Image (cartoon, rainbow, N blue to C red):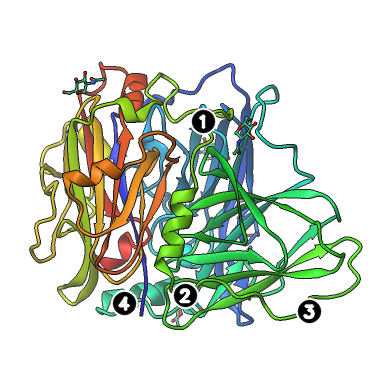
C-alpha cells in the first residue's frame, strides 16, 4: 500500500513577546468557537470538529498586509492548536501554531492568534495541528487578495471558490491515533471529500464565464488528482506565487499543497463531473462533485473521466512545468532583493531523509533517524528564555545517518543570515510532503536517483516556484533539491534578538499521535 505522511521542517527564527503588527494596515477580527458536532461526510454519523458550527470551517478572506485577529475558543475536551499553512511568519513565528512554537489552547479556554499577511497574496488553508484533529475537521481556506491597485496577471474571475480536497476515514481521530500507537500504519482511507462532502459537492457557474478555484489538499496521506469533465484548468498561482499560466486537463495536488486554477464554462450547458482520485495507491479512491451551469439542461452524464493513477513521471513533469511568472506582479518571497535566488551562494547543504519504523511498539516516523519527541517547554520559549535542558542543538545530524530510529527533540542550528540548500530524500515506497512552517522555499530540482553535488547542474536557478510544501515521489529513486532564503526573515527580526537560527524537524500531520 502506498501511503504518504507529511513532515514539517519548521524553521524558528528568533522570538519576541511583542506582537509586531503594523498599525496602519487594516485589521480583520474573527471570533471562532471550536466544538464537536455530528457530521455525515460518508453517509455515517461521525463526531466532527466544527468552527462556528461549520465543517469545513469558515474561509478567511484577506488582502495583502491585513492584520488578522482570530480569537479561538476551544470548546473541545482536549487541547487544540491551529496552524496557518503557508502564512509567512515574517516577524515572529510565535503564533505559527505547530507544537513547539505555540502552546495549545486548553479545553474551555480561548486564545487570540495575531497574524499579519505581510507582503503575501495567494491561496492557503488552516488546520488543527495536534492529536490527529485534522482527521475530524477544523480546517478551512485562507485567501489573500492583492491590494486594489496591484495588477493581477489575469482578468477578475466571475467567481472565486475554495475547494478543499482530502482523504477521509470513518474512524475518528482517537481511533486513528490508537492504531499508530499500537504499531500499525494508517489503513487505506475510506473515501475522499470535496469541501466536506463525500459526494455531490457543487460548483455553480454561468456559461461563458471564468472562475478561480483555490484547491488545497487538506487530507492526511493521499496525493490527489483533480479534474473536471470536458474542462481544462489553467494554473495561475501556487502558494502565493503567480505562475506561468499553464493549461492542464488534470492536476496533482499533494498533501498540504494549494493551487489556484482558472476554469472557463465554455461547454454546452449541463452538469459536469468534478473528480478527485487518489494517486499512487493500490486501490484508487474516487469521488465526484458537480460543476453546474446556471442554465444546465441536465445532470451529469457519460463516464467519469479517468486520471493518472501510478504514473510518477507524469507527476514530476507537471510539477517541473509549474514555474514563476517573473514579470507578473505579486509580492516576492524576499522583497529585500534576493529574489534572484539563483545568484546567491549557499553556505550550507542540509540533507534530510525520512524513514518509518516501530519504536517501543508504536509506529513512528523519523528524519535522519530521529523521531521527534515534543518537549514539555515549547522550543521557542526555551530558546528565548535560554532555558537549558529542553533540547540540544545538534540532536539531529544534517546528513542521513543510515542508523535505526531513535527519539529526540531534534534541533539543528544554522547560521544567522545564511542561505541554505536543503536536499530532501525519500527512500520509502510512499510519497512524502515536506512543509516549512511560516516560510517558503524555492523548489530548484526534483528528480530520481541519488543526490550528489553534480545534481546542482540541473537546478532551476531562474524561475522555480517559491512555496511552502513540496512533494517527494515514492519509490527508492527520487530526491528533491531545494534552497531557501532565510536572510529576509532575520533581517526583519533585527540582529538584536537572535544571532542564530534554529531548525527543528517534526511530524506535520502525525505530531502527537506517535508518541
Ligand atoms: C461555543 O459553542 C458551545 C456549543 O454550542 C456553547 O455552549 C458555548 O457557549 C459557545 N462558546 C462561545 C464562546 O461562543
Ligand atoms: C478571550 O476572549 C476575550 C473576549 O471574549 C478577550 O477579551 C480575551 O483577550 C481573550 N483571551 C485571549 C488569551 O485571547
Ligand atoms: C506573465 O505575467 C504577465 C504580466 O502580467 C502577463 O502579461 C503574461 O501573460 C504572463 N505570462 C504567462 C505565460 O502567464
Ligand atoms: C471514537 O470512536 C470510538 C469507537 O470506535 C469511541 O469509543 C470513542 O469514544 C470515539 N472518540 C471520539 C473522540 O469520538
Ligand atoms: C559566489 O561564490 C563565487 C565563487 O566563490 C564568487 O566568485 C562570487 O562572488 C560569490 N557570489 C556572491 C554573490 O557572493
Q: Is mark 4 within 8 Å of ligand 4?
A: no
Say which element carries label 2. Answer: loop
| Residue neighbourhood size for the residue with mark 4, other residues' Cα within 10 Å, grouped as few (<14), some (14–19), many (≥20) | some
Horizontal side, residue 463 vs residue 342: left or right: right
464 or 330, nearer to the observer: 464
Lower sequence index among marks 3 and 4: 4
Q: Nearer the viewer, mark 2 or mark 4?
A: 4
**For mark 4, what is the residue?**
185
Q: Is mark 2 within 8 Å of ligand 4?
A: yes
Could you say which disc has been placed on residue 326 in the image?
1
Q: Nearer the viewer, mark 4 or mark 1?
A: 1
Q: Quadrant of residue 310?
A: bottom left
Q: Is mark 1 within 8 Å of ligand 3?
A: yes
The span from disc 2 to disc 3 (Cα, nearest Å) is 34 Å
The span from disc 3 to disc 4 (Cα, nearest Å) is 38 Å
For the residues bearing labels 2 and 4, Cβ distance under 8 angstroms: no
The span from disc 4 to disc 1 (Cα, nearest Å) is 42 Å
Amino acid at each position: 500500500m502506498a501511503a504518504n505522511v507529511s513532515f514539517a521542517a519548521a524553521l524558528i527564527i528568533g522570538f519576541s513577546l511583542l506582537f509586531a503588527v503594523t498599525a496602519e494596515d487594516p485589521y480583520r477580527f474573527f471570533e471562532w468557537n471550536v466544538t464537536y458536532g455530528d457530521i455525515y461526510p460518508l453517509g455515517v454519523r461521525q463526531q466532527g470538529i466544527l468552527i462556528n458550527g461549520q465543517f469545513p470551517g469558515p474561509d478567511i478572506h484577506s488582502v495583502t498586509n491585513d492584520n488578522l485577529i482570530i480569537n479561538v475558543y476551544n470548546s473541545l475536551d482536549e487541547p487544540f492548536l491551529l496552524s496557518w499553512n503557508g502564512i509567512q511568519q515574517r516577524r515572529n513565528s510565535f503564533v505559527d501554531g505547530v507544537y513547539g512554537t505555540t502552546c495549545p489552547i486548553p479545553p474551555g479556554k480561548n486564545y487570540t492568534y495575531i497574524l499579519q499577511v505581510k507582503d503575501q497574496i495567494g491561496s492557503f488553508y488552516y488546520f488543527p495541528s495536534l492529536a490527529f484533529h485534522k482527521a475530524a475537521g477544523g480546517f478551512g481556506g485562507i485567501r489573500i487578495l492583492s491590494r486594489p491597485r496591484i495588477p493581477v496577471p489575469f482578468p477578475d474571475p466571475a467567481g472565486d471558490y475554495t475547494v478543499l480536497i482530502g482523504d477521509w476515514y470513518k474512524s475518528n481521530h482517537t481511533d486513528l491515533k490508537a492504531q499508530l500507537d499500537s504499531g500499525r500504519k494508517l489503513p487505506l482511507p475510506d473515501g475522499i471529500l470535496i469541501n466536506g462532502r463525500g459526494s455531490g459537492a457543487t460548483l455553480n457557474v454561468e456559461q461563458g464565464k471564468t472562475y478561480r478555484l483555490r484547491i488545497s489538499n487538506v487530507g492526511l496521506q493521499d496525493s490527489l488528482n483533480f479534474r473536471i469533465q470536458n474542462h481544462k484548468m489553467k494554473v495561475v498561482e501556487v502558494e502565493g506565487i503567480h505562475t506561468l499560466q499553464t493549461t492542464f486537463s488534470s492536476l496533482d495536488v499533494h498533501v498540504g499543497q494549494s493551487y489556484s486554477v482558472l476554469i472557463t464554462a465554455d461547454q454546452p450547458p449541463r452538469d459536469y463531473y468534478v473528480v478527485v482520485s487518489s494517486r499512487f495507491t493500490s486501490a484508487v479512491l474516487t469521488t465526484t462533485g458537480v460543476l453546474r451551469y446556471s442554465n444546465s439542461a441536465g445532470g451529469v452524464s457519460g463516464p467519469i473521466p479517468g486520471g493518472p493513477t501510478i504514473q510518477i513521471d507524469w507527476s514530476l513533469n507537471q510539477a517541473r512545468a509549474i514555474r514563476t511568472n517573473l514579470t507578473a506582479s505579486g509580492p516576492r518571497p524576499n522583497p529585500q532583493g534576493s529574489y534572484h535566488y539563483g545568484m546567491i551562494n549557499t553556505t550550507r547543504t542540509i540533507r534530510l531523509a525520512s524513514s518509518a519504523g516501530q519504536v517501543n511498539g508504536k509506529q513512528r516516523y523519523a528524519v535522519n533517524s530521529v523521531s521527534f519527541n515534543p518537549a514539555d517547554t515549547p522550543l521557542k520559549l526555551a530558546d528565548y528564555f535560554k532555558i537549558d535542558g529542553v533540547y540540544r542543538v545538534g540532536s539531529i545530524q544534517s546528513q542521513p545517518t543510515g542508523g535505526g530510529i531513535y527519539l529526540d527533540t531534534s534541533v539543528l542550528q544554522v547560521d544567522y543570515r545564511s542561505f541554505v540548500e536543503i536536499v530532501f530524500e525519500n527512500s520509502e515506497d510512499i510519497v512524502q510532503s515536506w512543509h516549512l512552517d511560516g516560510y517558503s522555499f524555492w523548489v530548484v530540482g526534483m528528480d530520481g536517483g541519488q543526490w550528489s553535488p553534480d545534481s546542482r547542474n540541473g537546478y532551476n536557478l531562474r524561475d522555480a516556484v517559491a512555496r511552502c510544501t513540496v512533494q517527494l515521489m515514492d519509490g527508492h529513486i527520487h530526491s528533491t533539491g531545494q534552497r531557501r532564503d532565510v536572510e529576509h526573515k532575520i533581517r526583519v527580526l533585527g540582529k538584536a534578538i537572535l544571532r542564530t537560527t534554529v531548525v527543528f524537524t517534526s511530524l506535520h500531520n502525525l505530531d502527537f499521535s506517535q508518541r
